[in-house]
Image: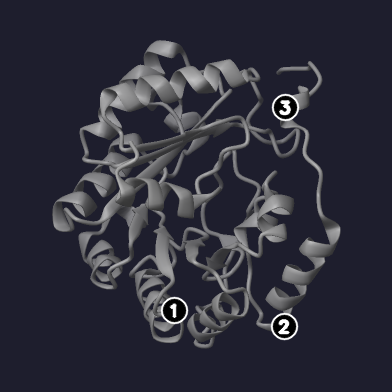
Amino acid sequence: MLTEKKPDWLKVRYNQEAIDEVAELMKELNLNTVCKEANCPNLGECYRKHTATFMILGSICTRNCRFCNVTCGKPMPPSEEEPENVAKAVKHLHLKHVVLTCSTRDDLPDGGANQFAKTVKAIRAMCPYTTVETLISDMKGNKDSLDIVLESKPDVLNHNVETVKELQKAIRPQAGYESSLGVLRYCKEQMPDMRVKTGFMVGLGETEEQIDTLLDDVLATGCDILTIGQYLQPTPKHYPLARYATPEDFARYKEIALAKGFKHVASAPLARSSYRAWEALEDVHNGIY
């Protein structure tokens, strides 16, 4: 376990006023944000900009991944009011781009796919100029479930591979590397014009060679957008932190990934899957990369 102090580039300041304002709206509409549930280090910045990643299907996850701070347990049934309430929050916050994610719901036959689709449609109806990104679980690789999400036509389909192949069983014992690659590949094959996105963490004990292989494997699925961020151990009970990658490391990862052919790469210590997600979509649309 790494015992050195957190480096300065990982220290952030929170804007409590902005946090309280968005948190109050979420409470009024009985909504969850992954920003709060996963203890995201960018919570202060995103809330200050009136952006948030909505966590639909409740705040309880049916899996127990060793890197994640979301509570594991028995979830409640999906809320019928949730899709419209998310749309109301999107409208209230004047969001240009919204990210929808979820706790993994292996208890549901569709993995939560219908709730995703209903929420996308509710946002489209209330906020027609807002682009929508769905950050989904692997849904056990069920193609019927994936089709339900795809048929709602999100602007970006996001599913995280999380870590290199060699660490999957230790980090994600109820998921799998090939399954995640399969989700990305299937979604791109079904919707070639839709942007497909994934992300992974460093600092878990991976090697440079393993990272390079991961980049090749992900790119081969047709994935367009990539995020790379620093793993931060939520509690002593979670998977131990092996190292702090430097800003220079992240700059190198970005350069390598772009050279391989990714259309947009967000690689930084505090980069997370939904951090500045609207920028990635705009850059790809505008052909910046």
Q: Are marks 3 and 1 in contact (CB under 8 Å)?
A: no
Which mark is first along the chain, 1 or 3?
3
**Nearest to the observer: residue 91 or residue 57:** 91
Q: Residues within 10 Å of mark 3 (few under 14, many from 20)?
A: few
Residue designated by label 2? 28
Residue designated by label 3? 9
Q: Is residue 44 above or below residue 167?
A: below
Q: Amino acid at mark 3?
A: Trp
Q: Are marks 2 and 3 in contact (CB under 8 Å)?
A: no
Q: Are marks 2 and 1 in contact (CB under 8 Å)?
A: no
Q: From the viewer's perspective, tell me whether residue 174 is left or right of residue 219.
A: right
Q: Is residue 270 above or below residue 43?
A: above
Q: Which numbered disc, 2 or 3, marks the residue closer to the eye?
A: 3
Secondary structure beneath label 2 = helix
Where residue 239 sits: x, y (%)?
Answer: 63, 31
Q: Residues within 10 Å of mark 1 (few under 14, many from 20)?
A: many
Where residue 202 sits: x, y (%)?
Answer: 53, 26
Q: Is residue 162 visible?
A: no
Q: From the viewer's perspective, tell me whether residue 2 is left or right of residue 55.
A: right
State the residue lying farthest toward the right.
16
Where residue 123 sits: x, y (%)?
Answer: 44, 79
Q: Amino acid at mark 1?
A: Ile
